[in-house]
Each structure stands twice: as C-alpha cells, then as structure tokens.
Image (cartoon, rainbow, N blue to C red):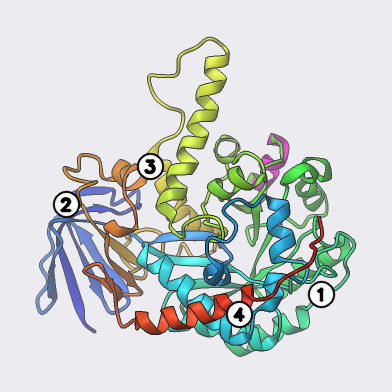
Amino acid sequence: MKKTLFKDAAILTLDPTVGFLEKGDLLIEGTHILEVGSFIEANEADIVDASDMVIMPGLVDTHRHVWQSVIRGIGTDWSLQTYLSKIYYGNYGAMRRPSDDRIANYLGALEALDAGVTTFLDWTMINSMDHTEELIGGLKDAGIRAVFAFGTSGDAAYWDRESTLTNMEDAARVKKAHFQSSDQLLTMGLAIRGPEFSSWETSVFEIETARSLDALCSMHIGFGNWGAGDRSIERLHKAGLLGPDLNMVHINAIDADQMKMLADSGSSISITPEIEMMMGHGYPVTGLAIEQGVLPTLGVDVVTATGGDLFAQMKFGLQAERALQNQSLLMEGIMPGPDLGISAQQMLEAATINGARALQLDHKIGSLTPGKEADFILIDRTSMNLLPMTDPAGAVVQTAHPSNVDSVYVAGKAVKRNGKLVDVNLEEVKRKAYAARDHILSHKFESTPS
C-alpha cells in the first residue's frame, strides 16, 4: 500500500501517550496511521513538506441536520419555536424532493470537509425511503465519515408528546441495505424523537430497536421550559435504559443529579453552544458536564442559523462557560483568576476525541494514534491570523477558521488539498443547490403551529 510521510509539522495528536510534537512527522500507509514521532525515516514513501502546518485529528461534529444546507441562513432571527414551526409540522422540511436531499447532503458534507470536519452525525428527517436513499447517496458522494442517524418525518402527527407513530420497520430495512458492515465510512444510527416529542412507550420501543440494530441512538432531550419539569433523563435512568449507545442532545435544563446519571451510565451528550444560546434552548451545560464526569462534545446543529464549522463552536463553547464561571465569581465580589476555569485544550478534545467516543468511533478516529484510520487535517500556521504561532492548541480553538484548513484526509484519502476540495464540480453543486432551495422555498404557508 502507498505510504505518505508528512514532515516537520507541529502535531496535536490528542493522544495522551504520544502528546504534542512541536516538530514531528506523521506516516500513513493506505487508510491507516503507521507512525507518529519526532523523526521518521520511510523508504519509498511520498514526502509532504508540512513545516508550515499544524497537523491534528479531523474535527468530529456529533449533531448536525445536514439536509438544511440548501436553505442556509433562512433562520438567523428564528427562535426555537419559530424554527420548529417552519421546518417541521409539514412545512419546509416536507417540501423536499428526493433529488433535493441528495444535493443537500452532498453540499452539507462538502461544507463540513472544507472546514476540517471529517466526521459528523447526520440527524435526519426522513420523508420516504426514496429520500433515504438520496440522503445516503449524498454522503457517499462527498467521501465524508458519518453516522447516518435514521429519523422520522417532520409531520406534526409524529412530533406530538403522545405520538405512537413509528417507522422502525423502515429503519431495519435501511440497516440491512446499507450498514451490514461496520468497516465503512458510513455507519448506522437512529435519530429518535425521545420522550419529550413522542409517547414514552414509543421512545422505549425505539431505543430497544436501536439496540437490536446495533445502532447509536440520539435524541433531543432536557431543554426548554419543559426540560426541567419532565426530568426525562431520570425517567430513562429508573427504567434502566441509559447506556453508552444513547446520545443526548442539548440537555440545557437538567440538573447535576441527572448529569451524574449520564456519567454513571456512559451516555454521551452533544452541545451546540451557538444555536442553544441563540434560539432559547437554555445555557450550554459544558461546565456542568465536566464537573459531573461527562465528556462534552460539540455540534453545529443547523446551518439555517449559523455556519457549518466547529472552530466557531469551540470558541462559543469556551467563552460561554468562561463567562458563566467568571460572572459567578464577580457576583461574589471575587475577581477571576489566575487561571480560567476551562481550557482551550478541553474544547479541542470536545471537538475531536470526545466526539469520536460519543459516536462510538474512538477505536478508529479522534486522535493521531498509530493503528487508527488516517482522518486528519493540516492547518496553515503561516496564515495572517495565526502568524506567528506560539500555542497551537490555543490558536486552533481561539483564532482559526475554515479558510486556514489547507488539507483534509479521510481514511488516508485527500478530500481537500492546498486549500481546495478535490474532484468537486462547484458549478454543478451551485446549480443543483440553487434549484433545491428555490423549490423548497417556493411553497408559502398561510399559518404555522405556535
């Protein structure tokens, strides 16, 4: 198999054994990382001069509604209630044709890759089996690594707290058709409504179905006004349903006791700090999670209201938690310091290895560990906003943005090189994206549920 040796980079391995290399080499062979070290000799390897680069694991986004790429920016002033009424309940989300979903997921995946996100969980809205095929097809076309979380339609009848509707038979068919092997870029998940958006019995059934399909199970839960009152995490705990294969999204309104239940069970969480602060989910729970032993992970959530990169989410997550802790001290008449309560390194971990663990992919990705698959990115540290670099981890979290991403590799294959996506017909992408957007937004709704 072909070997490639990346020379003289600053390497953020996110592997505690290997650590940070101020000047080091990375050797890959085929789809895997062969060696990481201060100096590597490799006969017959292609040599890449990476002396101007930071090499680090690809970013991992644990919660994104990818199809919404084709209606990007429509909801920059929407609250959560407005978002739900416009996208769900038979409105814009129901207007998509299967062909719209293919270009939407292709565009959304390209956007992620361009920004250094090599893996995401696609939290889907499934309108039909034809739509499902095209959503999966779009991800495959882009060459991204993803958990395809099979969901329900956005019809109001599904998104009712007493709903008993389910499409788990379709989920089983999708598993059989596309996800028989775990040794592929796309793996299977379920995007269930959970006990706050469907009946309790339906939620239990869908969690059990996910386990029978060996699929990660993700749900929106524990946020908004209802989140604190419902205590859904406690209810799942008492029913013996929590576990490392459950992913809880947002959870802004849960307390320390429920967070400890998640920690004890190994259940993962997805924090989408920018959207949560904007739309009204509640304040991000990053600090509470760390305090109770839950590893935070990050997601973009919806590009209807924000950009599709994790650099912004790392920064939002870090500053939101710092602001919360600082204000608490100031209210007591204490000046913060000498150290802030949460570090840039912790946010970098949230966007890489923690996310890989949450998606049950940390045996494959999330750190530059020999033997893992070669998902990594090169960041140009000579970019004006990064020059001269003194603290690579801090610079990535606090200063970097997508245009600093020089190259992106997924399973050893370059999908972006020298600042440009590889083998992408941008004119065709634009044409199809505009057509999908125009079709979806051509439908006018006289009223929407509140």
Quadrant where the image shows the C terminus:
bottom right
Residue that extends furthest to the top in the rendered view of this protein: 333
Using the image, tell me which numbered label, if any, was put on residue 405. none
Measured from the top left, where is residue 365 in percent x and y?
41, 64
Q: Is residue 320 left or right of residue 411?
A: right
The secondary element bearing badge 3 is classed as: helix
Question: In the image, what residue type sits under mark 1?
Answer: Thr
Question: In the image, what residue type sits under mark 3?
Answer: Gln
* Residue 188 placement: quadrant: bottom right
2 vs 3, front mark: 2
The Cα–Cα distance between marks 1 and 3, rounded to whole angstroms, is: 41 Å
Instruction: Kindly identify the residue that appears in the image at 78 percent across and 78 percent down.
Output: 167
Q: Badge 2: few (under 14), some or many (20 or more) residues near its Cα, within 10 Å?
A: some
The Cα–Cα distance between marks 3 and 4, rounded to whole angstroms, is: 43 Å
Query: Can residue 403 be seen at all in this image of the molecule?
Result: yes
Measured from the top left, where is residue 384 in percent x and y?
19, 48
